[in-house]
Amino acid sequence: MSSILHIKSIAEYHRLMELPKPQHPLVSVVNFEDIKRTNIATNSSITYGFYSIALKQVLNGKLKYGQQEYDFDEGVLAFISPNQILRIEVEQGQEYSHTGWLLIFHPDFLWNTALANKIKKYDYFGYELKEALHLSDKEETMLKEIIRNINQEYNSNIDKFSQDVIISQLELLLTYSERFYQRQFITRKKSNHTILEQFEKILNDYFKSEDSSTIGLPTVKSISSSLNLSSNYLSRLLKTLTGKSTQEFIHEKLIQLAKEKLSTTELSVNEIAYGLGFEHPQSFGKLFKKKTELTPLEFRKTFN
């Protein structure tokens, strides 16, 4: 297994990519075409100690995020959080080349600003590369204009207003990205509904399995992994399509099955709880009461 290269600082990134020293220690705007040393970034796994937002086209080569391969033959916007593993693979004999821009900023750059906490609410920093944002030409033009504004400020003399100006533009970029992701969820209806169907099948198959009592309750993470999606992306997708998060879907299915068993079988409440995968019947009773405003026994009595 290959080792992982961890690039801790923006200055270190510039040095490894043979770029000029950054104008600011905590933020930088990079044109991919200016990167001279690409061999350090190919066929190796990398993590950053900072946030990365990239709008790029990879002309030769594919990116890997975890075990998932992603082809950047179209311009897309990708968001990488600190310490997430990124891998770039190039076929033997090919030269890795890409175009576009990269905005990188250290978490310390957000210190003492509202964005320091707000950035955690942008789920797309937890998406996998294959869930990157595909931009229309109009959207791409809008975001490039914001980057140009950041770059202009970045290359000006740093003063006490510099951070505020860059932060305001960064917030605008993130807000537009949030809007464009919402558009992507809506416009890609066919593929998204296929995911919804697969999700429902996985959930149904789980509860039909005789092993549910021994393997425990289905989790957001386990179902997301079965779909080869990140947990954040799946929940956001389901919320957009149905108004419910992944966890709410799981709970709804649990309550539906519990109601069936309570109304059509002689199984005890404890037997039903264990059969559904609950480790403790009290947890089942608490969830059932929360969702139906009745205890399992009170619900069963309505059928007697």
Image (cartoon, rainbow, N blue to C red):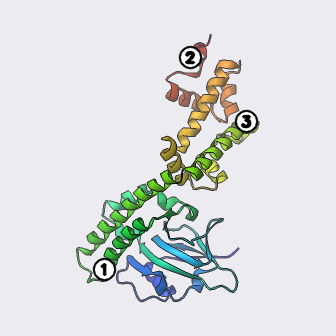
Q: In the image, what residue occupies the spot 64% across and 49% down? A: 222
Q: Can you tell which mark lies on residue 66? A: none
Q: Residue furthest left?
A: 160
Q: Earlier in the sequence, mark 2 or mark 3?
A: 3
**Residue 129 lies in what quarter of the image?**
bottom right
How packed is label 1: few (under 14 Cα within 10 Å), some, or many (20 or more)?
few
Residue designated by label 2: 298
Q: Residue furthest top?
A: 304
For the point 60% across and 86% down, which residue is it? 39
Q: Amino acid at mark 2?
A: Glu
Instruction: For residue 265, say whether it is visible.
Output: yes
- Residue at image x 49%, y 76%? 8
Q: Nearer the viewer, residue 267 or 234?
A: 234
Determine the secondary structure under disc 2. Answer: helix
Mark 1 — residue? Answer: 152
* Residue type, label 3: Lys
Which residue lies under the disc numbered 3? 208
Q: Nearer the viewer, mark 2 or mark 1?
A: 1
Question: Dots 2 and 1: beta carbons under 8 Å?
Answer: no
Separation (CA) of disc 1 from disc 3: 59 Å
Q: Name the spot of residue 137 as percent of width and height, x first.
A: 43, 68
- Looking at this view, is 149 or 163 the one in front? 149
Left or right of residue 189, residue 163 in this image: left
Residue 85, how many percent across, how many down? 58, 69
Element at label 3? helix
Three-letter code for the amino acid on which mark 1 is drawn: Gln
Residue at image location 45% in from the left, 88% down from the top? 19
Residue situated furthest right in the rendering: 210
| Labels 1 and 3: the sequence-earlier one | 1
Judge left or right: residue 275 versus residue 289.
right
Mark in front: 1 vs 3:
1
Q: Is residue 49 visible?
A: no
